[in-house]
Amino acid sequence: MDIGFLAQYVLSGIMLGVVYAMVAVGFTLYFGVLDVINFSHGDVLTAGAFVSLATYLGLRATGIDSPVVVLMIMLVVALGSMALLGVLIAKFFVLPLRHAPPFITLLITLMVGIAIRESIRLFYPSGSNPQSFPQLLPKTAYHWGNLIVRQDTLILILTGLAVIALVNLFINHTRAGLAIRAVAQDGETAKVMGINFEWIVLLAFALGSALAALAGVMNGLYYNEVNFGTGLMLGIIGFCAAVVGGLGNIYGAILGGFLFALLQTIVVVAVPSLTAYKDVFAFGVIILLMVIKPTGLIGEVSSERV
Amino acid sequence: MSALLSCHGLVMRFRGLTALDDLDLDIRRGEILGLLGPNGSGKTTFFNVVTGVYKASGGRIEFESQDISKSSPQAVYRAGIARTFQRSRLCLPLTIFDNIMIGNARHLDHGLWFNLVRRKQLRRQFEACWAEAHDLLTIFNKALGTRLLQAAGSVSMIDRRRIEVCRALVSRPKLLLLDEPSAGMTHEETNELMDDILAIRKRMPELTIVIIEHGMSVIERITDRCVVLNYGRKLCEGTYGEIARNADVQQAYLGTS
Amino acid sequence: MFSSDKLPGAASAVAGVIAIAVFAMVLLRIHDQWGLLALGVIGGIALLLAVRTGAAAHFERAFAAHERLMNGVVVVAFLGVIAVLAKEDFSLLILSTVLLYCVACMGLTVQLGYCGVMNFAGAAFFGAGAYTAAVLGGHTSLPHLLVVLAGGLVAGLLGSVLLLPVLRTRGHYAALITVAFGILFRSFLDVNNTLGGPQGLTVPGMTIFGWSLNQGLAIGGITLSFYVNYALVTLALAIVVYTVTRRLERSWVGMHFDAVRIDELAASTFGLNVQGLKIMAFVIGNVFAGMAGAVFAMMTGFISPTDFDFPTSLVLIAIIMLGGIGNLWGILPAAAFVLILPEKLQAIQEYRFLLYAGAVILVLLYRSAGLFPRRLRRHFPPKAVS
C-alpha cells in the first residue's frame, strides 16, 4: 500500500477524530453535571460555524485583511456567542426541567436543536444551501516523497489536540474543574459544600458549547463549507462516541471520538466502494461494543441511589 | 429451626467502599428478625444484595437450599422474597389498586391472548384480585378501602408506606424484607403498623420477616431475634435484651466514653 | 357553571363531537387563505372559551362516561365527514393521512406513553412498512390485506433486531439507537438503488377481495373520489388499532407497561420481566406503524425516502407530546392540527418544523402532560348508569 495514500487517510481520520472528540467531550460534560442528554449540542456547533462565517463576511466588509486577525476575531465571536447560547439553553430549557424524567430533557433539547437548525435554514440568507467557508489557513503542502501533508490539516489537528489537552487540564487540575467534577459526582453534596450548583452547570454548558463552536469553525475551515444540517450528524456521532467511551468520562469521550473516526476511515480505505455505508458500519460496530460493554469502554459515571 | 436464608462470607464492594465485609447471617424460618446498626452499616445494602439489585462481590447466599447469589431480582421474587424500600418507591400516577397488584405478578396471567381477547376471564381475575387487595389494605387502614381507585400520589406519606407493605405481601411471599417501614411515622402510627404486621403474621404463620428499624421500642416489641451490623460485619446477635446489654453495640451506637 | 357531581349526560358529549366534526369539515373544504385564518382564529377563541368556562372539562368527563356510545358517535361523525367530502380528492387524502399518522402515533403511545421506551425512528418503521408494501405489492401477488400485515411484521422484526442489543442498558442508549436509525434509514435508502434510491418507488393501488380501491365508487349516477375508499380503509385500520391499544392499556400488561415506565427497578424486584415488556411494547408499536405505512404506500401510489426521514419521526413525537402523552384521544386533534394546518396555510408551510418545535417546547415547559392529559389508568372504567 502506498504510504502517501495511507497517510492522507490517516491524517484526515485524525482530523475527524479531533472534531468528534470535541463534540463528545461536550456531551460528556452535560451528562456529568446534570445526568442529561443535550441533543441541541450538534446544532450549537452549526450555529457557531454560521456565526463565524457571518463575522468573516462582516469583517471583510470593513476591509481587515490579515487572515490571522480575521480568524482570531471569528473564533472569539463564535466561541463567545455559543458559550452564551449554551448558558441560555441551560438556564431556560434544561435547569427548569432537571427534576422531570430524563426523557423530557432529552426531548426539549432535541426541539431546541431543531429550532436552531430551522432558524438557520430559514433566516440566514439562502440558508438551505451549503455556504462556502473562507480559506483562512495556508493550504501549502509539505512533500516528503509520496507523502503530502497540507499545512491547514496539520494546524487544525495540532490545535484540536491542544484544546482537548487544555480542557482535560482544566477539568482535572483547576479549582473550577474540581467543582465541575464534584457536581458530577454528587450534586447534592456539592451544594452542601458551598459550590454554587447553578453556576457550575452553566459553566459546563458554556464550556461544552464553546468546544462545539470551535469544532464547527474547524470543520468549516477543513471542508471550506458549512451547511445547516452539518451539526445534526456530528452531534449524533459525538453522542455515540461519548456513549461508547462511557458517558460522563472525559477520557472515554476522547477515545470514542477517535474510535469512530477510525472505523469510518477503515471502511473508506479498505472497501472504497462502500464509502456511502461508512456511517452505518461505524454505528454498527459501536452498537456491538455497547452490547459487549454496556457501560462504555472506560465506564459510565453516574449516580443512582437505591 | 432450619435456616430459610443463609449468607456465607458475603462481600459487597463499591469502587473503594466496602459496604458488606465478609458477612455471615442466618434467617430462621418463621421468625421476625430485627436488622440493626448505625447508618451506613450495610443493612439496606444487604437487602439489595439478597434481592439481586446488586451483584455481590463475593460470598454465597442460599434461600431454601437454593443458591441465589447470582439471581436476578425477578428470580429472587419468584423464589418467594418480597421487600419494601427505604425511600418510598410507589408508582404515584397509578391507582392504589395497581400499586398493590404490581406486587402480585406471580399470580397474574401475563399472556397477550388472555389480556386482549379473553376479557371475561380477565374481568374475573381482576375482581378476585380486587377482593384480595381490598382485604389486605383494610387491615392497615380501613379508610383506604374505598380509595383503591385513587392515585397513589393522592394519599399521605404514611398511607403510602402501608400500601408498599401491602404490595410486598400480596404475593404471599415466604420472606418479607421491610426497610424502615415506620420512617416518618409518629409513635401511635408506628404501633398501629406493628399491630397490623403482627395481624398479618397470624394469617400467614409461615411468613418470615426481616425488619430494619431504628426505633428500639419497635424492635423490642416485635422481634424474636436481632442482628446488629457495623461496617458491613455482624457485630452481635441475640434477643433484644441480649444485644441491648452488649457493650460493643452500645459503643457502635453511642461511641466510647 | 359546568361542574356537577353526578356523571354528565351523553347529550353534551354528542353535541361536542358534532361541533368538532363540523369544524373539521369546514376546515378541510376551505381553500381561501383569509377564510382559513378567520376559521383558525374562531377555533382558537372557541377552544379558549371552552377551557375557561369549564365546558371542555365537562365535555371530557361526558365523553369518558359514555365510552361505548361515544366510540360509535365518533365513527358516525367520521363517516359523515367522509360523505360530505366525497368528491374532494385532496381533502380526503389529508383526512386519510391524518388517520394513518394517528395509527403510527398509537403505536408510539404504546412504546413511549405506556412503557417509556424511546423511539425517535417512528417514521423509519412507518417507511419499513411502506417499502414492504411497495416490494410485495409490486412483485408478488400476495393479497393486499396480507401485505399490510407483512408491512407490520417487517417493521416489528426490524425493531426487535434494533432494540435487543441495548435492552440491558440505560434509556438513553435506546434513544441513541433509534435516533441513529431514524437518520440513517433515509440515507440507507438514498444510496440503495435496489429499493429505488432517492427517486423512490411506485406502489400499486390496494385491491381487497377483487375490489380495486383506485376506482371511485359510483352511487346513483355520481362518481365519488376513489379516496373515499382509502378513507374508509384507514378508518377501519384506525378502529382496529385503537381497540387493540385500548384493551392493551386496560389489562395486566398495560399495568406492567406503566410500572416499567415509572420505576424499572421496583418493577424488577416484583418479578416483572422488564426487558420482555419493553421489547413487547416496542414491537407492537412498530407493527402498528408498519401497517399504517403499508396502507400509506398503496394509497399515495408513490413513496420516496424523504417521506420517512428524521424530521418526520420528530413530527410523530410532537403529535403525542402535544396531544397528551399516553392519551389515545389526544392524538386525533394533535395530528389534525399538526398535519392539516400547514397543508392549508401555505404561508406557514416552510416554517412548520420551527413551529412544531416551539409548540412542543412550550408544552414541555408549562404543561408537560400535554393539552389533553392522560386519565388515571383503569382496568375497567365504570360505565355511566343510564
Image (cartoon, rainbow, N blue to C red):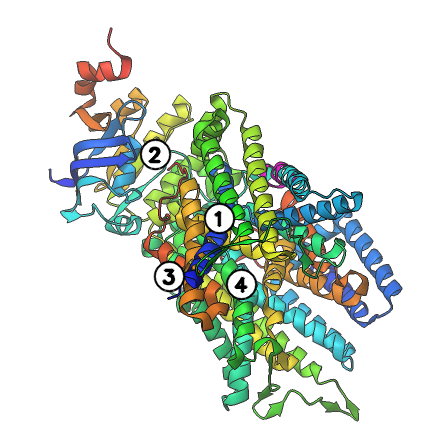
Q: Residues within 10 Å of mark 3 (few under 14, many from 20)?
A: some
Residue B68: x %, y % from top left:
20, 47
The residue where tag 1 is placed is A18
Residue B110, numbered circle? 3
- Left or right of residue B68, residue A68 in this image: right
Same subunit under labels 4 and 2? no
Q: Residue at x 34, y 43 (%)?
A: B168
Same subunit under labels 3 and 4? no
Q: Is A87 contained in the magenta span? A: yes
The residue where tag 2 is placed is B196
Do we see residue C255 in this rendering? no
Task: Point out the residue furthest to the top here.
Answer: B257
Same subunit under labels 2 and 1? no
C338 in relation to C196, above or below: above
The residue where tag 4 is placed is C182
Q: CA distance from mark 1 to mark 3?
A: 50 Å
Which part of the image, by quadrant, shows the C terminus of chain A? top left
Amino acid carrying mark 2 in the image: Asp
- Left or right of residue A119, residue B254 in this image: left
Q: Secondary structure at mark 2?
A: helix
Q: Nearer the viewer, mark 4 or mark 2?
A: 4
Chain letter, disc 1 residue? A
Amino acid carrying mark 3 in the image: His
Give the magenta-colored segment's residue range. A85-95
Q: Residues within 10 Å of mark 1 (few under 14, many from 20)?
A: many
